[in-house]
Image: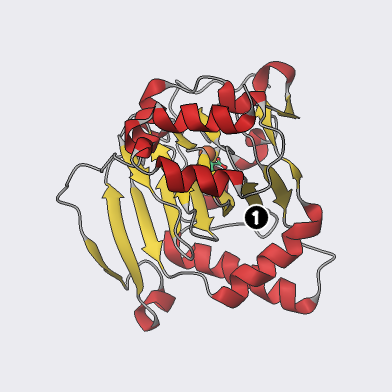
Amino acid sequence: MDQEEYARRTLMSHPALAEHSEPLLSLFTNTKHAKLSEDLQRALPEDFNQLCRSSHQNKPSRLHCRYNATTSPFLRLAPLRMEELSLDPYIVVYHNVLSDAEIAKVEQIAEPLLEHSSVYVAEVKKAIKSKVRTALGAWIPNSDMDASGWTVVQGLYRRIRDITGLNIDDKQHLQIIKYGYGGHYDPHFDYFNATVKNTLASGDRMVTVLFYLNDARHGGSTVFTHLQLKVPSERGKVLFWYNMRGESHELDTQTVHGACPVIAGTKSVMSCWIHELDQMFIQSTYRPGGRVFPY
Ligand SMILES: O=C(O)CCC(=O)C(=O)O
Ligand SMILES: [Fe+2]
């Protein structure tokens, strides 16, 4: 089966896509693609696929959109547009957080550094290239950068502190991830659950901050499979959630999430993780007995 035939069958087998099959197929055939990888043909979990379909709509909720002017003193001067998506676990989106100039700068810094991204695999105790994440990735260095780049990166750290009210160490690098056609990230947890040695020094990934650098034309949403929640990739906004429960710091399995395959266009995001022990002077970092540290 050639690529075009495969694309046609894929489109026709998804009811939500079938109605757009002709324009999508012509977009596919008129765009240059790398050879279709086996990754795309690998079956993804059905609950994940369901959420990724364009027909999925999040359930209505009683949550609000409002201006946040309280998390940090700076927000009193410049309130940010906040949309609550879930209270337990806490998941919110802030709109219009990044400027075009900031996006252009981080993309320019990351471009020469992009390579096939890897994921940490506990069994082999290292980050390896894997089919669960098919994307390009780059860590933004915090040195070897021109002054304008450094000003932008410092500004982003400040914005993350303002938005989350949490402490973040500048040594915590930002990561750029670029997904092309079919690029996705299988459902996973962001915490390491004591599988990585450096969580001893900094604690686990308490919070994830995900900036969207562009509008994915079709596909590419971030989805929380347990919560049945879909967050489209829209330029300039930031999604932020807690991977741990507030008081106990128990790892929250409800945060399982993934990135839907990109069907048209590309998707670019920038992520940052905030670690629990960096908060030691602003909140208690009590760990319950359930967490095992083998090192
Ligand atoms: O790209 C996305 O939407 C999600 C990325 C993600 O979950 C991660 O990098 O851990
Ligand atoms: Fe993630």
Q: Nearer the viewer, residue 9 or 106?
A: 9
Q: Nearer the viewer, residue 6 or 222?
A: 6
Q: Is residue 83 left or right of residue 240?
A: left
Q: Height in image: 258 above or below 122? A: below
Q: Which residue lies most toward the left here?
A: 62
Q: Height in image: 74 above or below 294? A: below
Callout 1: 10 Å neighbours few (<14), some, many (20+)?
Answer: many
Question: Mark 1: which amino acid?
Answer: Leu
User: What color scheme is it?
Assistant: secondary structure
Q: How many marks?
A: 1
Q: Height in image: 101 above or below 107? A: below
Q: Which residue lies most toward the top here?
A: 123
Secondary structure type for disc 1: loop
Query: Which quadrant, please, contains the N terminus?
Result: top right
Q: Residue at x 28, y 54 (%)?
A: 84
Q: Residue at label 1?
A: 174
- Is residue 154 visible from the viewing direction of this image? no
Q: Is residue 157 left or right of residue 125?
A: left
Residue 60, position as x, y percentages in the image: 17, 46
Q: Is residue 144 left or right of residue 20?
A: right
Q: Residue at x 65, y 71 (%)?
A: 104
Q: Which residue lies most toward the right here?
A: 144
Q: Nearer the viewer, residue 193 or 133?
A: 133
- Is residue 184 visible from the viewing direction of this image? yes
Q: Residue at x 48, y 26 (%)?
A: 9
Residue 136, position as x, y percentages in the image: 70, 44
